[in-house]
Amino acid sequence: MTIDRTHFTPWASLAGGLLLGLASALFVLVNGRILGISGILGGLLKPKGGDVAWRVAFVLGLLAAPMLYAALRGPWDVRIDAGWGTVVLAGLLVGLGTRYASGCTSGHGVCGLSRLSPRSLVATLAFMGMGFGTVFVMKHLLGA
């Protein structure tokens, strides 16, 4: 096995992980809620009184962050090695899995595991196992 040094980013990945962990901890401390993207977006689909503003602000922050990065650092080259059909199918499958698991990878993997939730452990093992399995099948069995 070799490491692709051009795409190996341990320091940026560490910084991102630390920021995500800090944001998750602050979110639960300030709001008493778990930081899971699917739950935040799902709350916008079935809005409750007084519960919309912070969700909209959160989503706008998610959209504004890459735009701010691009404004400060310049545009970056994005390469997706898949067709639109594959990307759409993958998105639908992730959405379906998120509904069945009652949460997304950020909710279960970051917040749920830190709370020692057995349900989150099972969900995270399922997410990761399917990811590993998909890569193995695509790269080693299908040669894609």
Image (cartoon, rainbow, N blue to C red):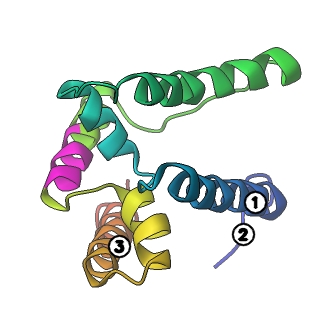
Find residue 125 and report its horizontal and vertical position in percent. 33, 79
What's the mark number on residue 141? none
CA distance separating discs 3 and 2:
25 Å
Please report whichever mark, 3 or 1, sits nearer to the chain's N-terminal start.
1
State yes or no: residue 107 in magenta.
no
What's the mark number on residue 3? 2
Span colored in magenta:
92-99
Q: Are marks 2 and 1 in contact (CB under 8 Å)?
A: yes
Task: Give me the residue at 75% from left, 60% from top.
Answer: 8
What's the mark number on residue 8? 1
Please report whichever mark, 3 or 2, sits nearer to the chain's N-terminal start.
2
Farthest residue, direction front = 50
What's the mark number on residue 124? 3
Amino acid at pointer 2: Ile
Q: Quadrant of residue 108?
A: bottom left
Q: Is residue 41 above or below residue 123?
A: above
Q: Is residue 20 above or below residue 64?
A: below
Task: Give me the residue at 43% from left, 22% from top.
Answer: 53
Find residue 7 and report its horizontal and vertical position in percent. 73, 53
